[in-house]
C-alpha cells in the first residue's frame, strides 16, 4: 500500500486500505483494536510487530494472522528486548549490504498497559536509553484486561478492578493513582511521544505520520475503552473515548523537540462524572451512596493537570 | 449421572447459568460439578459450559461429548458448523432450544435425534429483566426444571448465591427469581432413560514423524489469513445502512474497529457481514442516524 503523504484534514484522507484483516477474536467494540487499525493505516505493511502477551495476543492465533507484515509474540515483559534483537539483526544485514533500504522495516512494540507500566517498563527504559530505533504502541485499557481485568499500574484511582473491587474497607476501589507513562518516558527525552485516541482518527493519523519518518524511540499511548472490563455497551466505545478527551481526563498531546504540545484542548471541560457514570467500573461512586469526595478528588486531579497549561 | 451441556454466546450468562444449575443441584443434596470452556472467546463469541449432577461422587472430568441434557441458549448458533451445538446428542438426549421456531421443523431441518423442547425465553427475560439476551437465570431455570433434580426453592437459593456474588442488589435478585419461577412453571421435567452405552472402538494409532523446522515451526506464510475466520456469527444485532439517508461521510468506516466497512467504487459504505461482530458502533456514530439495527432473527426473516 502506498502511504498517505501530507497533513490529514478529513475522514476521506484516511488510507482506504485496511492493514489488519478482520476475523480476530478480540471483543466486539474494542477501542484498542480501532487504535492500532488506524495506526497501521499510516505505517503501512513494512512493520514488524513485537507483541507482548495481553489482549492483543488474540490478534494473531496460529495458524491465522490478520497482518500483512510480520508478527513476533513475546512474554509480557519482553517485547522491547525482542524489538532490540530484530532491529540489531536488520542493522547488521544492512551494514553487510544484504538488505536493501526498501526491504528494511520499522519495528513496533505492541503492548498493553500491564506490560507497559508494570512488567516491561525496565527494558523499555533501557531501550530508550540506548536510543533503540523503534515504535511503541501501548493500548491502555487501564487493567490486565485479557485475564479478567485485574489492577495494573495504569488503573486509575476510583476504578473497580477484579483485584481492587469496591468494598466496605476500600470504598473507592483502586486507591492508587494511574502511573503517568508519558512523563516517565519524557524524563528520558526520546525523540517522540504522543497520546492518541481512537475517537480522533485525524489527530492519531497525523501523529503516526509525523513519527514515521523519525529515528529512535517513538512512543504512543492509546487510551483504549474496553466494553468488557470498563462495563459499557460495545457501541459506546467512541462515546467513552470522546468523553475521556472532553472531560480532560485523557489529554491529547505530543512531545517533540523537547516541548509538550496539546493537540486537542477541550474548550470547556465536561465534569468528570459524565465520563465516570457511564462505566460499571465507576458505578460504586454513584450507587448505593454517592461518594462525593472520591469524585471530587478525580475532578481535582484533572483540574490541577490543566492548571499547569492554562 | 446427568451430564448437561450449555451453548450460548459470551455475555449472555452461559457460564453463570451452569453455575446456578450446579449450585442448585448441590443445594438439593446432589453431587455437582460445573465449569465453562473458553480460551480466546470474547463477548458475542460462541461459548460452551457444562454441569454434571449425580448422587455418587463425580470422578469424571473434562468436556461432555455426549450430553443427557443439552441447553441451547441461542438459536443463531444452531446452523453454525464451527459450534455444531447438537453434536454428540443421541436418542437419549433431551434437547432444549431457546427459540421461537417450531420443534418439528427444527428436528427435520437439523436432523436432530429427537423432538427438541422449545421455549422462547426472550419475552419472559425481557419482561422481568428488561433485556431479552441475559440468559443466566432463564436457561438455568429451564435446565433445572427439565433435569427434575432441583426444586424452585433450590434454584432461588442458588440465584442468591451466584448472582449475589456478582454484586447484584436485592431488588434485581428478586426480579431474577420471579423470572426463574415463570420459566420453571412453563416447563415440566423430562424423562431420562438409562443410556445404552455403545462400546468404544480403538482407532488406528497415528505415529507423528519429526518434520523439518520450516514445516514444524509455527510459521504463518499466508498473511492476512485471519479473515478465513468468519466472526459474523458473533452478531446478535445487525446494522443496516439506509442508503436513502446516507451521505457517504464515511464516519462509520472510520469508527469501525474491525475495519469491516469499506467504501465501494461510488464512495458508499458497505458492511462485510461475514466478519461484522455487531458492536453497533456504526449505528451509534452515524451523524445522520442512517444505520438501523435489527435483531439477527429479524434480519434472517427479511433475507
Image (tube, coloured by chain):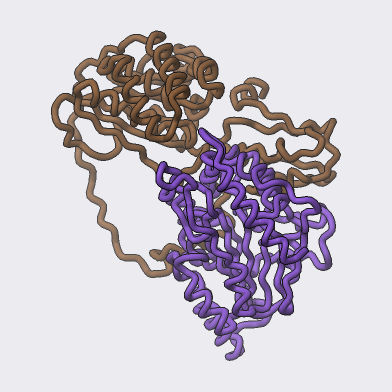
Chain colours: A purple, B brown
Left or right of B201 in this view: A54 = right
Q: Nearer the viewer, residue A194 or B226?
A: A194
Give the total of numbered labels.
0
**Is residue A279 or residue A17 the one in the foreground?**
A279
Q: Is residue B100 visible?
A: no
Most distant residue in the bottom direction: A96
State which quadrant residue A186 falls in.
bottom right
Residue at the far front in the pictured view: A293
What residue is shown at x 67% (from left), y 78% (from top)?
A191
Picture coordinates of residue B102 (x, y %)?
A: 49, 12
What percent of the width, then of the height, locates residue A199?
71, 51
Q: Residue at x 46, y 19 (%)?
A: B175
The residue lying toward the viewer, choosing from A276 and A75, is: A276
The N terminus of chain A appears in which quarter of the rendering? Answer: bottom right
Considering the image in quadrants, where does the C terminus of chain A appear?
bottom right
- Asked whether the viewer can see residue A251, the reply is yes
Tell me which residue sits at (43%, 62%) in the image: B218
Identify the residue at horizontal 43%, vertical 27% (top origin): B136
Residue B59 left/right relative to B141: left
Quadrant of the rendered image containing residue A138: bottom right
Locate residue A195, reporting x and y percent.
67, 63
Residue B233 vertical placement versus B299 (above, below)? below
Q: Percent from the top left, x then y, of residue A62?
A: 46, 56
Amino acid at each position: 500500500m502506498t502511504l498517505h503523504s501530507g497533513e490529514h484534514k478529513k475522514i476521506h484522507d484516511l488510507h482506504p486500505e485496511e492493514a489488519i484483516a478482520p476475523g480476530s477474536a478480540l471483543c466486539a467494540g474494542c477501542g484498542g483494536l480501532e487504535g492500532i487499525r488506524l495506526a497501521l493505516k499510516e505505517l503501512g505493511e513494512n512493520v514488524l510487530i513485537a507483541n507482548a502477551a495481553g489482549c492483543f495476543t488474540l490478534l494473531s492465533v496460529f495458524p491465522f494472522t490478520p497482518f500483512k507484515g510480520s508478527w513476533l509474540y513475546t512474554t509480557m515483559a519482553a517485547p522491547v528486548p525482542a524489538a532490540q534483537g530484530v532491529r540489531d539483526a536488520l542493522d547488521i544485514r544492512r551494514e553487510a549490504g544484504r538488505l536493501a533500504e526498501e526491504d528494511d522495516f520499522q519495528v513496533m512494540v505492541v503492548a498493553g498497559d500491564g506490560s507497559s507500566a508494570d512488567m516491561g517498563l525496565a527494558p523499555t527504559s533501557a531501550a530508550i536509553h540506548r536510543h533503540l530505533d523503534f515504535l511503541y504502541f501501548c493500548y491502555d485499557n487501564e487493567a490486565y484486561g485479557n485475564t479478567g481485568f485485574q489492577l495494573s499500574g495504569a488503573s486509575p484511582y476510583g476504578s473497580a478492578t477484579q483485584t481492587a473491587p469496591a468494598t466496605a474497607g476500600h470504598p473507592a476501589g483502586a486507591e492508587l493513582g494511574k502511573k503517568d507513562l508519558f512523563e516517565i518516558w519524557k524524563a528520558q527525552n526520546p525523540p517522540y511521544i504522543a497520546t492518541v485516541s481512537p475517537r480522533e482518527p485525524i489527530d492519531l493519523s497525523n501523529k503516526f505520520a509525523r513519527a514515521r519518518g523519525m529515528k529512535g524511540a517513538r512512543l504512543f499511548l492509546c487510551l483504549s475503552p474496553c466494553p468488557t472490563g470498563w462495563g459499557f455497551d460495545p457501541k459506546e466505545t467512541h462515546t467513552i473515548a470522546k468523553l475521556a478527551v472532553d472531560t480532560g481526563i485523557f489529554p491529547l498531546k505530543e512531545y517533540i523537540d523537547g516541548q509538550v504540545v496539546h493537540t486537542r484542548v477541550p474548550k470547556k471541560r465536561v465534569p468528570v462524572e459524565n465520563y465516570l457514570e457511564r462505566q460499571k467500573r465507576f458505578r460504586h461512586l454513584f450507587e448505593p451512596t454517592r461518594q462525593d469526595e472520591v469524585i471530587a478528588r478525580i475532578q481535582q486531579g484533572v483540574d490541577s493537570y490543566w492548571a499547569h497549561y492554562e | 449421572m446427568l451430564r448437561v451441556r450449555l451453548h450460548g454466546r459470551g455475555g449472555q450468562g452461559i457460564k453463570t447459568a451452569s453455575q446456578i444449575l450446579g449450585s442448585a443441584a448441590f443445594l438439593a443434596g446432589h453431587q455437582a460439578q460445573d465449569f465453562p470452556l473458553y480460551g480466546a472467546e470474547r463477548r458475542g463469541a460462541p461459548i460452551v459450559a457444562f454441569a454434571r449432577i449425580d448422587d455418587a461422587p463425580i470422578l469424571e472430568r473434562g468436556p461432555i461429548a455426549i450430553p443427557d441434557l443439552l441447553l441451547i441458549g441461542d438459536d443463531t448458533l444452531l446452523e453454525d458448523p464451527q459450534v455444531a451445538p447438537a453434536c454428540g446428542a443421541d436418542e437419549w438426549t433431551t434437547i432444549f432450544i431457546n427459540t421461537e421456531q417450531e420443534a418439528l421443523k427444527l428436528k427435520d431441518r437439523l436432523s436432530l435425534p429427537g423432538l427438541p423442547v422449545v421455549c422462547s425465553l426472550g419475552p419472559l427475560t425481557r419482561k422481568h429483566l428488561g433485556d431479552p439476551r441475559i440468559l443466566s437465570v432463564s436457561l438455568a431455570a429451564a435446565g433445572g426444571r427439565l433435569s427434575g433434580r432441583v426444586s424452585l426453592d433450590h434454584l432461588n437459593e442458588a440465584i442468591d448465591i451466584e448472582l449475589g456474588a456478582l454484586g447484584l442488589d436485592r431488588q434485581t435478585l428478586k426480579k431474577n427469581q420471579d423470572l426463574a419461577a415463570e420459566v420453571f412453571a412453563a416447563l415440566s421435567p423430562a424423562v431420562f432413560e438409562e443410556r445404552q452405552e455403545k462400546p468404544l472402538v480403538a482407532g488406528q494409532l497415528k505415529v507423528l514423524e519429526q518434520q523439518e523446522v520450516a514445516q514444524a515451526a509455527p510459521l504463518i506464510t499466508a498473511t492476512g489469513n485471519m479473515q478465513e475466520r468468519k466472526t459474523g456469527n458473533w452478531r446478535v444485532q445487525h446494522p443496516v445502512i439506509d442508503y436513502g439517508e446516507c451521505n457517504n461521510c464515511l464516519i462509520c468506516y472510520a469508527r469501525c474497529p474491525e475495519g469491516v466497512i469499506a467504501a465501494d467504487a461510488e464512495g458508499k459504505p458497505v458492511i462485510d457481514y461475514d466478519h461484522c461482530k455487531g458492536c453497533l458502533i456504526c449505528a451509534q456514530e452515524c451523524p445522520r442516524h442512517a444505520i438501523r439495527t435489527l435483531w439477527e432473527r429479524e434480519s434472517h426473516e427479511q433475507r
